[in-house]
Amino acid sequence: MKKTNISILLIIGILVFANLVSEQYYFRLDLTEDKQYTLSSATEGIMASMEDPITVKAYFSENLPPHIAKTKNDFEEYLIEYARHSNDNLVYTFINPNESEEQEREAMEAGINPVMINVREKDQMKQQKAFLGAVLQLEDRKEVIPFVQPGAPLEYLLSSSIKKIAVTHKPEVGLLQGNGQPSLAELSQVKSALDVLYNFKATQLNNDSLPIPKSIKTLALVRPTDSLKEATLQKLDTFLEQGGNLFVALNRVEGDLNSSYGSAVGTGVEKWLGEKGLEIRDDFVIDAQCATVAVQQRQGFFNFTSNVAFPYAPIISKFADHPVTKGLEAVVMQFASTLQFTAKDSLTTFTPLAFSSEASASKQAPQFFDIQKEWTESDFTSPHQVIAGVLEQTHDNGNRSRIFVVADGDFPISGGQQPLQGDNVNLMVNAIDWLSDDTGLIDLRTKGIHYRPIANLEEGTKTTLKYANFLVPIILVLVYGMVRMQLNKNKRNRRMEENYEG
């Protein structure tokens, strides 16, 4: 009895000691493949630099389907880690707006609108109103995450939102103007995405007496239609020598579907890039993996519009492994050209990042477009044409600059009422983010949940697994029962022998 009491007291003492130690020293093991629940150094740096408290109100519904409820759990796990690294400068609360009309109204007034999701209840499908959003507040500044998409990169979402309200002075990114380039309004989707972390503003270089503002570390040169002056190109050279970075989306060819004719164009930028070792050829990329164009056709007395595949509008889906291209699936281009690296010196490097498909080729300008042409495999004999990449240079003063080049100037420009393909926006935003970002946040854009679907199995394999799942447990139970029966039989025999000998 005395030994039992001592053991109980010893266990209680160990538990109390472990509890006291856990309050002082906290650690977790993250066994996920991409360290999903381990904060990056970029996020840790943002949280460590926080001087004023930030509050997070997370509006999440309860009793959600498992795949959506996991989003809430993951969001809360991240907030726990953020709070730990914030020196008590992050406080969060979770609110279920479905509990009362007052809380629902509070969520909607804050900018968190409900979404309708399908849930199964008693073998019936019904729709349920669900909230999955959050409001971050720092003093009088607010940032709303209206909807947390299941599978989204939560760390990037939270860190960029915190940085947006915590940093009062955003880095400047200049959009070059004055040579027929699109305005900020024509790049509205790109601007909306960049404005989260940057001040994306128009920048004029036509005035020869004004240098590029020192506050700008990245410039964007998108689809100039007029020739750039030599003085303007010299300003760009000086900008690069000082360690600046440049994004270039350039048309080397242009086409007109009304006249069915395409030709080469020049603005001086292609020659300027060629002197640095990167040639944008005056050719058209054609690709069997392409978008369609609307064509007027006539049948009998009737006119009708049909969509016809147009190989001169390649859909780019092959990308190199790079922070800019992570997560991209399809970028739609029109009248794109090919890139070729020609520099021979060791101070200049080029990294190809976007390619045409396996079934692609290029055609030298000028070209007549035959919309009704029946394309065959023999038309696509030059796979993986380089469409985009980054040119890096080390200058005589030791500074290193980067020029991200896309051989299609129109891909990020909004046209008409139709929004741009999402990855068209993402390619430019990712590129400028990579050129401008010195915090490492871009690496978090695709840090999230990886879905690995079960491989399709043959019918014979499925049948085998089905019967195995059914029979193996039964066989194991029978074997276990026979072993137990034999052991008990042996035990009885030994007792009988002992009694007989006695």
Image: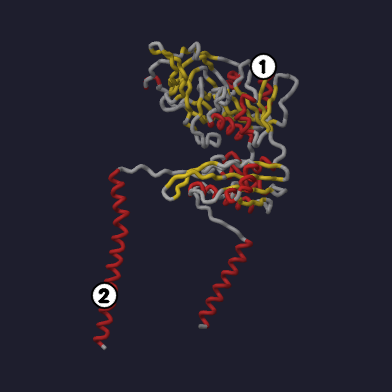
| 353 vs 416, nearest the viewer | 416
Question: Is 21 on the left or on the right of 363, as rendered?
Answer: right
Disc 2 marks a residue whose amino acid type is Lys
Q: Residues within 10 Å of mark 1 (few under 14, many from 20)?
A: some
- For the residue labelled by badge 1, is the local secondary structure a helix, a strand or a loop? loop
Q: Residue at x 58, y 57 (%)?
A: 27
Q: Residue at x 61, y 60 (%)?
A: 25
Question: Is 137 on the left or on the right of 410, as rendered?
Answer: right
Q: Residue at x 54, y 40 (%)?
A: 446
Query: Is residue 373 positioned above or below 110 on the image?
Result: above
Q: Residue furthest front?
A: 101
Q: Earlier in the sequence, mark 1 or mark 2?
A: 1
- According to the image, label 1 marks what residue? 229
Is residue 277 visible in the rendered image? The answer is no
> Residue 188 in the image: x percent, y percent?
62, 28
> Residue 205 in the image: x percent, y percent?
70, 21
- Residue 489 badge: 2
Is residue 447 visible in the rendered image? The answer is yes
| 451 vs 442, nearest the viewer | 451
Query: Is residue 315 positioned above or below 322 on the image?
Result: above
Q: Residues within 10 Å of mark 2 (few under 14, many from 20)?
A: few
